[in-house]
Image (tube, grey):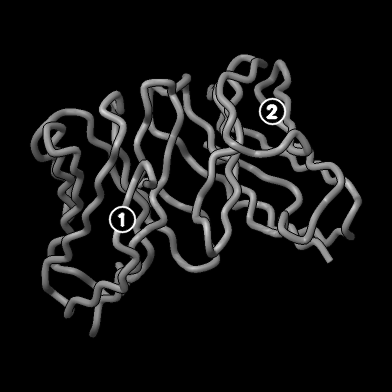
Amino acid sequence: KAGVTQTPRYLIKTRGQQVTLSCSPISGHRSVSWYQQTPGQGLQFLFEYFSETQRNKGNFPGRFSGRQFSNSRSEMNVSTLELGDSALYLCASSIGQGLTEAFFGQGTRLTVV
Amino acid sequence: QKEVEQNSGPLSVPEGAIASLNCTYSDRGSQSFFWYRQYSGKSPELIMFIYSNGDKEDGRFTAQLNKASQYVSLLIRDSQPSDSATYLCASLSGTYKYIFGTGTRLKVLA
């Protein structure tokens, strides 16, 4: 069974640009959560989608947005990139909303220069 | 105050010893608790989860939960150098949000 797939694995962007990250959950999983991981702050929750609806949102500015498609695949968008957005972005999928454990993808390493 | 707190470490234990990793949480509405292991440069991988008070054992790992004290721990028996990693504690809040601690770095010395 395929795991959680995130693309791309690495990205380098310039300040002010926007970026879109993709996450394909484990087959049959309907919940996708996104996290930002930095050395100083650890894993911080961005948002969670379940059945194409955003169910939870963390404390990030509106530049961070996402969506989920009918096949449960999810995308995360960051507009007007700032240097501080450089981080590892992880998505995790679970069968249902908060019902079971979440499994992580390999992450997308975003560097903003 | 962070919602899930862990000692950042490093926690150093000799090979074959028991490693004890601890975590406290502030949200009494938290339903379930998870332990993830993260090797440097890799994504977190689930070790085990617990939602009832008491102990839960899986191989060399034992998770302990005390809801009255808002305390979760992970014991690793017969620690191996391959167990050296950062261990993340996470809670599932009453609003279905996963909240992670900043992790404890474990070093198992051969």
Q: Name the residue rendered at 65%, 15% in the picture.
A: A53
Q: Name the residue rendered at 61%, 23% in the picture.
A: A49
The quadrant where residue B6 appears: bottom left
Which residue is denoted by mark 2 in the rendering? Answer: A73
Q: Chain of mark 1?
A: B
Q: CA distance from mark 1 to mark 2?
A: 32 Å
List x then y, in percent, for residue A15.
88, 58
Q: Name the residue rendered at 78%, 38% in the picture.
A: A63
Q: Secondary structure at mark 1?
A: loop
Which residue is denoted by mark 1 in the rendering? Answer: B6
Which amino acid, by three-letter code, is at mark 1?
A: Gln
Q: Is residue A100 left or right of residue A50?
A: left
List x then y, in percent, for residue A64.
74, 37
Q: Chain of mark 2?
A: A
Q: Is residue A64 left or right of residue B14?
A: right
As drawn, B29 above or below B42:
above
Around disc 2, counting alpha carbons within 10 Å, would you say few (fewer than 14), some (14 to 19), or many (20 or more)?
many
- Residue furthest to the bottom: B110
In this rendering, the label closer to the viewer, 1 or 2: 1
In the rendered image, the quadrant that contains the C terminus of chain B is bottom left
As drawn, B6 above or below B33:
below
Which amino acid, by three-letter code, is at mark 2?
A: Arg
